[in-house]
């Protein structure tokens, strides 16, 4: 068992993108398929008012709509790592990393729980049930899954783009770390952004495939964007159950989940969560809903013990082998 490092890092709130040429290895081993064959309709099927702010220019001037497809990976695969380390409270905490090598970007998907086709505040289901729904609706087997960002808390606003479609376009006006979103584009790049700086229509035009709003961003361009004192909500600086998505390189993602709330002072802070992901090799990472919502599934079963039996949530992130 090892202790996590205790190094203070400055909090960086600027929007950052990891561009295709940031990884020459990934760029040389991947090819792009035509945009017209991969982009899901960008119509705002469930859009809500107020609408997104008008934006004079995109945060991504280049075309990110061509789906990244690997020329070297024959099939999407996962590898699970389980480890237990001592946190800053000197309490042993177990965590899971699902290492994901995608054949194509759209093997990374999301499921949003709906009723009569409409997502809403009280429309939830357990992640296990949602995984079963994916199987019944698509016929595909889920290789791995984690809980998402619970976008439909009562009264909550913010962008929701899932599987290439705008689900909600009402925006949050704040410009601090608590209001920072995270987007994955069809070309495998990622971006942290503030909603008041770009509209959902521009995000879709730029090739946004998924976006989440829970936050905060944990890493950008290989550097931590949280420190030991970062507080985004009442639980963010204390030890807790955590869920996150991380990027090592285009088409190489990780799902992260740590246990917590099982004994006194177990779990991780945001800083500790980010440090683990950096040490694993991530260059970008984003915090998702934690606490009792935290859930990780791989190899046909739920992996984690949780403080609640299994909390019903709005959404999950999952991986298939198409």
Image (tube, rainbow, N blue to C red):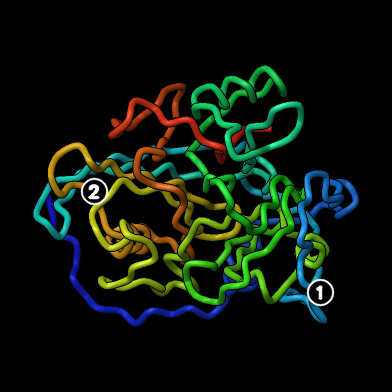
Taking depth in this image into account, of 43 and 143 the one nearest to the observer is: 43
On screen, residue 264 versus residue 49, left or right, reads left
Instruction: Residue at the far front: name it.
Output: 155
Apparent side of residue 74 relative to residue 77 in the rendered image (left or right): right
Q: Position of residue 236 (x, y in %)?
A: 33, 60
Q: Which residue is mark 2?
A: 267
Relative image position of residue 60 (x, y in whole percent): 74, 74
The relative height of residue 230 versus residue 251 in the rendered view (above or below) is below
Location of the C terminus by quadrant is: top right
Q: Residue at x 71, y 53 (%)?
A: 209
Residue indicated by mark 1: 54
The location of residue 64, given as percent across then percent down, is 76, 64
For marks 1 and 2, the one nearer the N-term is 1
Q: Nearer the viewer, mark 1 or mark 2?
A: 1
User: Residue sitting at 72 percent across and 52 percent down?
Assistant: 168
Look at 64% across and 55% down and name the residue there.
211
Compared with 109, 234 (above or below) is below
């Amino acid at each position: 068992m090892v202790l996590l490092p205790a190094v203070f890092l400055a909090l960086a709130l600027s929007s950052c993108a990891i561009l295709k040429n940031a990884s020459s290895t990934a760029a040389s081993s991947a090819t792009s398929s035509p945009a017209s064959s991969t982009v899901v309709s960008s119509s705002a099927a469930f859009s809500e008012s107020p609408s997104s702010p008008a934006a004079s220019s995109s945060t991504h001037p280049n075309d990110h709509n061509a789906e990244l497809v690997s020329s070297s990976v024959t099939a999407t695969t996962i590898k699970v790592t389980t480890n237990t380390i001592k946190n800053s409270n000197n309490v042993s905490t177990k965590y899971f990393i699902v290492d994901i090598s995608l054949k194509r970007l759209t093997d990374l998907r999301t499921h949003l729980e709906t009723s009569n086709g409409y997502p809403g505040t009280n429309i939830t289901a357990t992640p296990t049930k949602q995984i079963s729904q994916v199987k019944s609706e698509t016929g595909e087997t889920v290789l791995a899954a984690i809980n998402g960002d619970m976008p439909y808390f009562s009264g909550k606003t913010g962008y929701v783009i899932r599987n290439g479609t705008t689900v909600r376009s009402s925006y949050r006006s704040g410009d601090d770390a608590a209001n920072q979103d995270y987007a994955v584009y069809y070309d495998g790049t990622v971006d942290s952004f503030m909603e008041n700086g770009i509209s959902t229509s521009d995000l879709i035009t730029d090739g946004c495939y998924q976006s989440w709003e829970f936050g905060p961003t944990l890493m950008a361009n290989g550097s931590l964007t949280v420190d030991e004192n970062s507080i985004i909500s009442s639980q963010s600086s204390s030890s807790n159950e955590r869920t996150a998505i991380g990027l090592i390189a285009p088409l190489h993602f990780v799902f992260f989940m740590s246990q917590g709330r099982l004994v006194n002072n177990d779990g991780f802070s945001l800083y500790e969560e980010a440090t683990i992901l950096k040490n694993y090799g991530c260059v970008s990472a984003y915090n998702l809903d934690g606490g009792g919502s935290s859930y990780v599934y791989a190899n046909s079963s739920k992996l984690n013990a949780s403080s609640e039996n299994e909390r019903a949530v709005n959404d999950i992130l999952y991986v298939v082998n198409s």
